[in-house]
Amino acid sequence: MRALRLTAEWPVDTVAAAIVFPDGEVRTTGPVHHRFRIASIAKMLVGYTVLIGCEEGTVALDQPAGQPGCTIRHLLAHAGGYPFEGDGPIARPAQRRIYSNTGVELAADALAKAAGMPFGEYLTEAVLAPLGMNDTTLRGSPAHGVHSTVADLVAFVGELRAPRLLSPAGAAQFRTVQFPGLAGIVPGIGRFDECDWGLGTELRGSKHPHWTGTRNSPSTYGHFGGAGTLLWVDPGVHVACVALTDRPFDEWAATALHLWPAFGDAALTEAGV
């Protein structure tokens, strides 16, 4: 497959990737059972876990968390007013989209406190164990400290495409824009007047340029990570891609922002899109 062969040209020591086609077929390349730090793709796992916690009655999206006026929903959608790192808020909630590890950590902490167990345990019981993601572990911050494999993330993609752990309404919330119309920055990509975000997952929307394929539909959602990793699902055409590497994004960002869209476009072409 041309799309998967393209990953051999990436300036990284190790890469593993997968494409999930509309009929559910999965094609892969590289060491799919090799553990990589997935960096901010972990935020998707946080959002999904919190939504399960909501359906279990452990927490509620609109319960207070963080600074006054802030809720779990704000935190997962990078609308809580917190900086990239640091405990002190720098804006009021829902004023602009400020990409924040702190906000996601606060959301995970709210779930952990309500459940009376560490977030990592809730993550395992709610998501990892049911999906058979046995090679996925949390090592540090829930926002960026997860290590996983392409094989495990393909299992997560299967859940995203056909949810079993969440109700249809809950799964839809995950990839529905929260606080529409907020401007903000996607780190390493650029500033957007409409910087759409779901609950732990970025939404492509009208963003251009973007790290997904140039032909991905606006409904595409996912995340890329500072470890040189990406995961996206395009429900408009029922195609998904995962790619994990061992080279930090900031060391090859300019190159990645050409190579990643080319990979996505090739995957869409091979899927007949």
Image (spheres, rainbow, N blue to C red):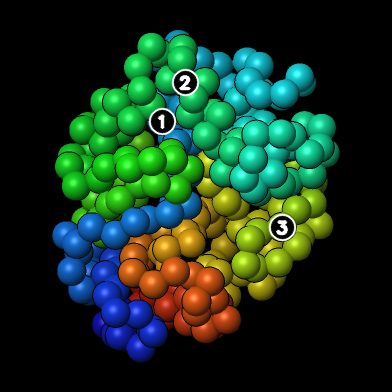
Residue matched to label 1: 49
Q: In the image, residue 164 lies at what x, y percent?
A: 31, 32
Q: In the image, residue 172 lies at what x, y percent?
A: 52, 36
Label located before the other in sequence (2 or 1): 1
Q: Visible in this render: residue 248?
A: yes
Quarter that holds the N terminus: bottom left
Element on which disc 1 rests: helix
Mark 3 surroundings within 10 Å by alpha-carbon count, few (fewer than 14), some (14 through 19), many (20 or more)? some
Label 2 to label 3: alpha-carbon separation: 27 Å
User: Mark 2, mark 1: which one is toward the viewer?
Assistant: 2
Q: Residue at x 69, y 44 (%)?
A: 83
Return the residue nearer the eye: 183 or 212: 183
Mark 2 surroundings within 10 Å by alpha-carbon count, few (fewer than 14), some (14 through 19), many (20 or more)? many
* Up-down relation of residue 145 to residue 108 (above or below): below
Q: Residue at x 16, y 60 (%)?
A: 33
Q: Which amino acid type is shown beneath numbered disc 1?
A: Thr
Q: Quick check: 188 left or right of 13?
A: right
Label located before the other in sequence (2 or 3): 2
Mark 1 surroundings within 10 Å by alpha-carbon count, few (fewer than 14), some (14 through 19), many (20 or more)? many
* Up-down relation of residue 215 to residue 50 (above or below): below
Which label belongs to residue 114?
Answer: none
Residue matched to label 3: 185
Q: In the image, residue 197 lies at what x, y percent?
A: 63, 46
User: Mark 1, mark 3: which one is toward the viewer?
Assistant: 3
Q: Quadrant of residue 238?
A: bottom left
Label 1 to label 3: alpha-carbon separation: 25 Å
Q: Quick check: 149 left or right of 247?
A: left
Q: Residue at x 32, y 40 (%)?
A: 138
Q: In the image, residue 50 lies at what x, y percent?
A: 46, 27
Residue matched to label 2: 111
* Up-down relation of residue 222 to residue 5 (above or below): above
